[in-house]
């Protein structure tokens, strides 16, 4: 089903602020740990511009805001969808599929890999490609 955009991020942020009795500083404080974790800066100027409607947040900053405010990112963009975040059933199911197909070690490795930055992920992929060129893996396709 196609979702229709009935609002915008500016209005949705204002709605959340009113509903949850938040000020801009409260939102910034909520975003700090997530911004730090994902190395995405979201500052007072950004938030002010979003609330004034001058600028729409990019996908990374929408993610930070939706995580911090615990709302559905698509709702935050202004679409006609429930405000509540999708539950973690999807993540649970993905984890279960990986664990059943490849084992617990693979799942742990993926979770560790996901914590690396883009550069280090490239390094790991390079190492794996190098290892797969060895005779040990030459018969594996």
Image (tube, rainbow, N blue to C red):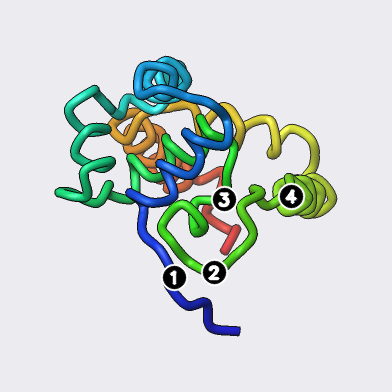
Q: Label 3: which residue?
A: 72
The image quadrant where one finds the N terminus is bottom right
Mark 2 or mark 1: which comes first in sequence?
1
**Circle 2 crowding by C-alpha within 10 Å: few under 14, some 14–19, many from 20:** some
Callout 2: helix, strand or loop?
loop
The residue sitting at the bottom extreme is 1
Q: Marks 1 and 3: CB-CB under 8 Å?
A: no
Of residues 140 and 3, the one nearer the viewer is 3
Residue 82 horizontal/vertical position (percent): 64, 59
Q: Residue at x 41, y 33 (%)?
A: 124
Q: How far apart in space, not on screen, are marks 4 and 2 (Cα)? A: 33 Å
In x, y percent, where is residue 110? 60, 37
Q: Label 4: state its secondary structure.
A: helix
Tell me if label 2 and label 1 are in contact, CB under 8 Å. Answer: yes
Point out residue 112 in the picture as x, y percentages from the top left corner: 57, 27
Who comes first in sequence, dot 4 or dot 2?
2
Question: Which residue is under mark 1?
Answer: 6
Closer to the chain start, of discs 2 and 3, is: 3
Q: Using the image as rendered, state which of residue 6 and residue 77 is in the foreground.
A: 6
Q: Residue at x 37, y 21 (%)?
A: 28
**Residue 37, image x, y percentages:** 43, 21
Element type at mark 3? loop
Mark 4 or 3, nearer chain start: 3
| Distance (Cα) linking label 2 and label 3 | 11 Å
- Indicate which disc residue 98 carries: 4
Q: Residue at x 35, y 39 (%)?
A: 126
Disc ID at residue 117 = none
Select label 4 or label 3 by which is in front.
Answer: 3
Foreground mark, 1 or 3, reads: 1
> Label 2 vs label 1: CA separation?
6 Å
Q: Which mark is residue 80?
A: 2
- Crowdedness near tag 4: few (<14), some (14–19) or many (≥20) residues, C-alpha within 10 Å: some
């Amino acid at each position: 089903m196609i979702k229709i955009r009935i609002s915008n991020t500016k209005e949705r942020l204002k709605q959340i602020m009113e509903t949850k009795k938040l000020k801009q500083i409260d939102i910034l404080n909520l975003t700090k740990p997530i911004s730090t974790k994902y190395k995405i800066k979201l500052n007072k100027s950004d938030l002010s511009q979003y609330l004034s409607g001058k600028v729409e947040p990019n996908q990374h900053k929408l993610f930070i805001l939706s995580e911090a405010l615990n709302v559905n990112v698509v709702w935050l963009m202004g679409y006609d969808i429930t405000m509540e975040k999708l539950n973690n059933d999807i993540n649970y199911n993905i984890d279960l599929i990986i664990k059943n197909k490849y084992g617990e070690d693979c799942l742990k490795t993926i979770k560790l890999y996901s914590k690396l930055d883009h550069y280090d992920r490239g390094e790991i992929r390079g190492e794996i490609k190098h290892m797969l060129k060895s005779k040990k893996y030459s018969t594996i396709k």
